[in-house]
Image (cartoon, coloured by chain):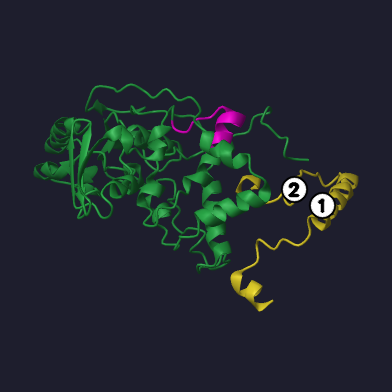
Chain colours: A green, B yellow
Amino acid sequence: MSGNIDRIKEIARGLLETEKVDVVIGFKKGTLPVMSEPTIIRKASDTETLIWDATCRLNLCNYLTGRKDRIGIIAKGCDARNIVGHIVENKIKRDQLVIIGVPCTGMADKKALSDLVGGEVTAYAEAGDQITVKGPAGEKTVSRSEVLQSNCRSCIKRNPVIFDEMAGEPVEELVLENRFADVEKIEAMDAGAKWGYFEELLSGCTRCYACKNACPLCYCPTCFVDESRPQWVGKGTDPIDIRTYHFLRAFHCAGRCTDCGACEAACPMDIKMRAFTRKGVKDCVEKYGWETGMKEGVRPPLDTFKTDDPEAFIR
Amino acid sequence: MEHMGIEKGRLHYSWISSAESTKFVEVVKEVTDAAKAAGPNTNFVKRYMKEAE
């Protein structure tokens, strides 16, 4: 996949040189080896700093919200789905965008990589489908499919749904036996066990809000957690406040989440908070036949009313 | 909510028109009975309050 980078740079340079766009949003090398940084470039010469590899986990759609200029954006499958969502939610106009689509074969999980080398990764290299990492326990080479993020294992759209330029040949979509096995496992528990499961899951949370900052859906000018009149939720690290935050965030993402995994990728404590949002994804598929961001111009299920909407929960 | 560990019967949804007074009474009865049956919700108590007990 990193092989697409030359084509990405070429398209980005072309767009900036011909002044078709004001900025290009992409990834550059981060200060740490496995943490690529989102970057916004304005000069054609800066396109040399662009990179594309299995560490470009974050969702670039996050940086589109409310921009007024013309933007070139590099989009993998999930980013493109979020861009569709942004257009539907009036956060950006389609004609402002030049989308550089990149077929994606999945991103490498940062925890899986550090586990491989028994600590902090000090060097990262990619050659074709092979990833080589160095760390305290020496050098290890693995194939990308062994260290994929869990959301990439259950990905339904690796190729961008909308794009203006394509930076590579489309890749084969995954054939999934049971996308929601993880959700079903939690559904099978009783109430007490579920409560305990999430208690354990969130035990490391420090409320740093990296998850909501990385999330393209979390674009409210003032998040409910920051409001103080009224104050919806306590601001400390009381377990119940932490839980309320994650509860509510999951509800706000229902029917909008593309399961891009940016929240988990950004989490410094490796909390798998997709356990919350995945339920919303599953319910929308089962109850409304809805997959977020797969088609332009369709409003999400929680935004529309149909006479045959399921209403078994209401009396 | 149930998925996240809230017990069944703690959360109720209903749509009652202002003209449906009998339905309103029925629903209120049901909800209060269900709430009493479920007992106090100790899960949503803050840590400092638990410690004070």
Evaluate whether residue A280 shows in this view.
Answer: no
- Rendered location of residue A153, percent (x, y): 40, 33
* Residue A291 part of the magenta segment: yes
Front one among A17 and A33: A33
Front one among A221 and A5: A5
Marks 2 and 1 share the same chain: yes
Location of residue A5 with respect to A235 vertically, above or below? above
**2 and 1 marks in contact (CB < 8 Å):** yes
Location of residue B37 with respect to A106 vertically, above or below? below
Q: Chain of mark 2?
A: B
Q: Which residues are magenta?
A: A280-293
Question: Mark 2 or mark 1, which has the lower sequence index?
Answer: 2
Front one among B22 and B12: B12
User: For the residue labelled by badge 1, is the local secondary structure a helix, a strand or a loop?
Assistant: helix
User: For the residue labelled by badge 2, is the local secondary structure a helix, a strand or a loop?
Assistant: loop
- Rendered location of residue A265, percent (x, y): 36, 48
- Numbered label attached to residue A124: none
Dot 2, how many residues are within 10 Å of its Cα: few (below 14), some (14-19), or many (20+)?
A: some
Q: Identify residue for label 2.
A: B12
Q: Identify residue for label 1.
A: B34
Residue at image location 26% in from the left, 39% down from the top: A54
Instruction: Name which residue type carries label 2.
Output: His
Q: Chain of mark 1?
A: B
Residue at image location 52% in from the left, 38% down from the top: A182
Looking at the image, the residue that sits furthest to the bottom is B52
Q: Quadrant of residue A221?
A: bottom left
- Rendered location of residue A99, percent (x, y): 28, 33
Instruction: Name which residue type carries label 1.
Output: Ala
